[in-house]
Image (spheres, rainbow, N blue to C red):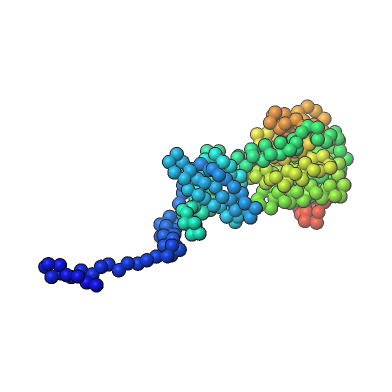
Amino acid sequence: MASADQLGFSFKPPDRRIWSVRDLVAAVRTHIEREYGDTWVEGEISNFRAHDSGHLYFTLKDQNSQIRAVMFRSQARLLRFRPENGMQVVLRGRVTIYEDRGELQISAEYLEPKGAGALLIAFEQLKAKLEAEGLFDPARKKAIATLPRRIGIVTSTQGAALRDILNVLLRRHHTAGILIFPAQVQGEAASAEVSAGVRYFNKARNVDVIIVARGGGSAEDLAAFNNEALARVVAASLIPVISAVGHETDFTIIDFVADLRAYSVRGGRAGDPLASGSGRTNRGTSPAAGTGHALPAADGAAGAYGTWPARRVCAHERCHQPAAAKAG
């Protein structure tokens, strides 16, 4: 009801809007999400919890404040490392409010460790995990014959690594029977295809040793060989496995679980893992010791496909031999 003062002015009390708690929280949430829908924030992870559903829950804090964070399964499965308490990270996400509790939180869409890269942290985490399980134990390494009669190679049929290996074998062990299982050696499907190759040879029992090979590259290029599932397949192989992935300075997880590590040296002449000599990382010697055996690269041996004996056959119907191979 309006009222009048001494000067004849009338005043109307303001209308009151009474919110329900839910409506107020929803309205604030809408405003916050509009203003902070794409936000980068840096902080330390604490109270980390990985739920059975695949969602990740944690608190992001600094010296003065903290905020709850959630990363849903669809984004969490893309992480290359496992978040841990005390880890400094940079997060990209959407600031929102969890309406049931009225709590401010960040819905994370991307997470990266501050400082060391995600791939390096993932490598060190998996390395520590498998080492603690005993998969690097020298006692579990299998001996490799000096001159195996049948050799299985899991690699790309289009890569330089295969040419290098065939060139070495042509010079030093041309009587060996070669079976090739074609596999991608880079990209999302690579670890599964390489695993399939190792499993194939173990099931067929048609070779004396398996070589998993690809040339050198960046950490991203070699990421498939730091895959936990692939490492366990290699470790469980009943047939000795040689890891011939990357160059001397490249290390992958399967180097540690394989029975021997070799590396490719473009244009080198240091020998090969199937010939006698020193420098082999057999019997569990750690690749970190720097004693990996060099696998020489092809030196103008493009014709090696054509001159290799007919016993070099494909182990799988997906194998596509280069045109030069048909000449042999």
Percent position of residue 118, x then y: 58, 43
Asked if one can make out residue 115 in the rendered structure from this viewpoint, the answer is yes
The one nearer the camera, 175 or 102, is: 102
Residue 140 is left or right of residue 95, and the answer is right
Query: Which residue is found at the position 75% from the left and 48% from the top?
Result: 195
Query: Which residue is found at the position 51% from the left and 41% from the top?
Result: 44
Query: Which residue is found at the position 46% from the left and 41% from the top?
Result: 62
Percent position of residue 57, x then y: 56, 50
Q: How many marks?
A: 0
The one nearer the camera, 125 or 245, is: 125
**Res 255 quadrant in image:** top right
Percent position of residue 19, x then y: 39, 65
The one nearer the camera, 120 or 205, is: 120
Residue 266 is left or right of residue 56, and the answer is right
Residue 13 is left or right of residue 270, and the answer is left
Asked if one can make out residue 163 in the rendered structure from this viewpoint, the answer is no
Residue extending furthest toward the top: 278
Q: Is residue 268 positioned above or below 44 on the image?
A: above
**Res 150 quadrant in image:** top right
Query: Which residue is found at the position 77% from the left and 41% from the top?
Result: 235
The one nearer the camera, 77 or 162, is: 77
Percent position of residue 299, x then y: 72, 38
Quadrant (top left/top right/bottom left/bottom right) for the N terminus: bottom left
